[in-house]
Image (spheres, rainbow, N blue to C red):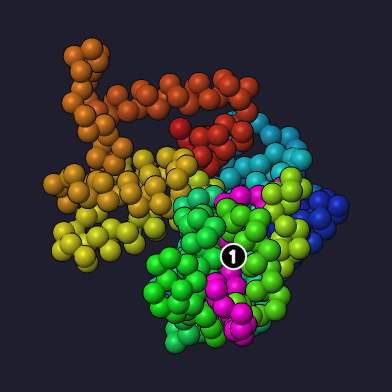
Amino acid sequence: MKPIPYRICLIEDDEIMGEALSDRFNLENLKCDWFKTGQEGAEAVAKGVYDIAICDIQLPDINGEDLFIQLKATQVELPAFIFTTGYGTIDRAVRLLKLGAHDYLTKPLDIHILLNIIRTACIKARPAVVTKNTLGLSSAMRHIESLLPRMAKGATSVLITGESGVGKEWVARALYRQQDPKEKSPFIAVNCGALTESLLEAELFGYVKGAFTGAARDKKGLFELANDGTLFLDEIGEMSAAMQVKLLRAIQEREIVRVGAEKPITVNIKLICATHQNLKQMVEQGRFREDLYYRIHVIHVHIPPLRERKEDILWLAGLMLETWTTENTDPRTLDQSAEQALLDHPWPGNIRELKHCLERACILSQQTRLNAAVLFGNISTPTTEEPECTGSLNSHLQASEKKYILERLAANGKRIAETATDLGISRKTLWEK
């Protein structure tokens, strides 16, 4: 079933701004109703059909802040409100946030920041239906998930890109399940960067008895094993120039020749490739064949790093801890400090780093509830040269947090939006802090 688009109530009297935002929202598959007066917008919001409302402060018939106060007084369940204005002040922003507004943006609007805020708020308002095949709760992963049924219809090659450990094989397997829900056809995966050129050729295409020393029998290659199924070539950017030529021929002709053989073998596969490298840049540098690039780059799926989709962090952590509990009959949960620490961490190693972090904590901790110290603490014995700390842990953490926030504010010229992005938290959270 196709997901129902999120609905936005846009209250904006500026013709140019309203039309531009409406068009962009529709392009992003966000259903937008545009109202030019506060009265019209208030009547629409009161019907309770919207996931989010975007309201200008300066409206022709009423102040946006007063409109919000009046709506709250009606006891109607309101969507998340984002206020926009060309005349922003810190006092008004704090006042609106205290009243319950979701966020406050000044014009000219950064459309990318606005879209991220909208999608985050919409996900909270209408959580995804989570199944075993769900890719994530973030808007980015839900968007990729929504594309899978269309990508699964043809035999077109798919290229998945993203940093190491970001979950490229996870997405590849989700696409395979869309193509074959009962999983009767084979799914064969190989890491091209883990094998030498000669070994990779033998693995991909197979070999015949006597083809080289140690070839005591005929062996099918991964192309043959994946016949009528899916072949996933991970880290294809690591493949040598000679292997790129052989791979291109196999993809174009849909046939392979085993090492040491002469007779070609026809294969029928769906090809999914993945890499953490910039293949287009490699083509420009002469390190990757241009014809192969266009052959595998028919559909491109980019997976953002974990630090850019924080909604997925605690969800993924929950899945991993459930798996740990099932496999080890040793339940583990996260306390509030652990959850906040996971959200604040930049995760340069992405999902792989998160998995190792949780495994380490589960192994070392004897407590059922994991805290921040267990997740990220130094397990070595402290030396006598370390300064002695006094006071409660909470007061020490608060002091450290305050010092760091002030340092980042100063570094960003006290600009709230840039500092919030730098800290990896929302503008609203930074205002509150």
Q: Is residue 422 visible?
A: yes
The residue shown at (54%, 65%) is 201
The residue shown at (37%, 24%) is 400
Read off the magenta span: 258-281
Q: Secondary structure at mark 1?
A: strand
Q: Is residue 6 visible?
A: no
Answer with left or right where residue 83 lies relative to residue 286: left
Residue 299 sits in quarter: bottom right
Q: Is residue 414 above or below residue 28?
A: above
275 drawn magenta: yes
Q: Is residue 5 above or below residue 417?
A: below
The residue shown at (50%, 21%) is 407
Q: Position of residue 75 (x, y in %)?
A: 50, 60
Answer with left or right where residue 159 lies relative to residue 340: right
Dot 1 crowding, Cα within 10 Å, few <14, some 14–19, many 20+: many
Task: Point out the image quarter for the N terminus.
Answer: bottom right
* 79 and 378: which is toward the camera: 378
* 21 and 304: which is toward the camera: 304
What's the residue type where badge 1 is placed?
Cys
Q: Which residue is mark 1?
A: 273
Q: Is residue 34 above or below residue 345?
A: below
Q: Position of residue 194 (x, y in %)?
A: 47, 55
The residue shown at (65%, 31%) is 89
